[in-house]
Amino acid sequence: MPPAASPSDAELILAVLERDDRRAFAELVQRHQSQVRTVLRRLARGDTALADDLAQETFVLAWRNLSRFRFEARFSTWLYRIAFNAWQTEARRKHEVLLDLDDDAPLPGPEGAHEMPDIAARVDLERAMAELSDGERAAISACYYADLSHEEAAAALGMPLGTVKTHILRAKAKLRARLGKDKP
Amino acid sequence: MTDIDRVLRDNARVSLPDDGFTTRVMGSLPPVAAMPRSWIHPALVIGSAALGCVLAVVLAPAGGSVLQGFADLTQLKAFTPAAFTALGIGIALLVSALVIAIETD
């Protein structure tokens, strides 16, 4: 006998909305916790305690506002939007400058644009990510860690599409330069 | 895909263990009783409207002749006691319908 197919996100959401089914919501949390927490860890510069607090706040807000979910976008995209808002609110509370474009900052030179070994790059990646500007880190987190398209990232972050693309280009150039520089 | 794309995608694929996170989230949700029930507000509004209608019938000078009031209204006699009673009932029902429609939206 084949195993029963696990319910889709939409089916679980309907179970929560129609029957206040907490087990269904727990299943949604289990499914998405890893990516939401990873994205928030990148945004919080590796501060895992803060990231997990924000992730918890994200899921509680999702529970409270689930009736507003319109099923037009993926549930994960909607969750990331809540997560990015939670992070921005926290950063504003700490009086940080957010989502700056740094238009005048020069792009790193081509010296880092060579191929780099996988292991060294992974070891240093998190440190290099922490050195990006808030906007660059948010754009990279949205497009790579949350797997959003540039358009979805722009909507989730409340940035113009061109700004997201610029942040991605600059961030990748900086990471490439940083990771290349650290190469022995 | 460039080298840095590959590194970022590989890093994003690493899965975090739950480590009790789901339990903490479920424990911080509001209690079940605090969740608003979709039928409570409409029931309150309809109940209030029904009570208003009964009071209109009992207290209005027209007494029980509500049907006479509607008949008066159809004949454009809006200033009879029975017509006032019928108007009161109609307005109460209309307001309750509007409140329910706005809350449902």
Image (spheres, coloured by chain):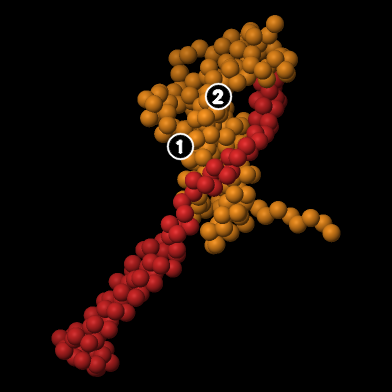
Q: Colour of chain B?
A: red
The answer, for residue A101, to whether it is visible in the render is yes
Q: Of discs 2 and 1, which sits in the foreground?
A: 2
Q: Which amino acid lies under the numbered mark 2 shown in the image of this protein? A: Gly
The residue at the point 23 percent across, 80 percent down is: B88
Describe the element under mark 2 as helix, strand or loop.
loop
B52 up-or-down from B37: above or below: below
The answer, for residue B71, to whether it is visible in the render is no
Q: Label 2: which residue?
A: A46
Quadrant in the rendering for residue A176? top right
Are the two marked residues, 2 and 1, in contact with CB atoms closer than 8 angstroms? no
N-terminal of the pair, mark 2 or mark 1, is 2
Measured as percent of width and height from the top left, residue B17 is found at: 66, 36
Q: Which amino acid lies under the numbered mark 1 shown in the image of this protein? A: Asn
| In the image, farthest residue toward the right | A1
Q: Label 1: which residue?
A: A85
Q: Nearer the viewer, residue A67 or A73?
A: A67
Q: Nearer the viewer, residue B80 or A20?
A: A20
Q: Colour of chain A?
A: orange
The residue at the point 56 percent across, 54 percent down is: A22
Chain ID at mark 2: A
Q: Tell me the quarter of the image containing the C terminus of chain A.
A: top right
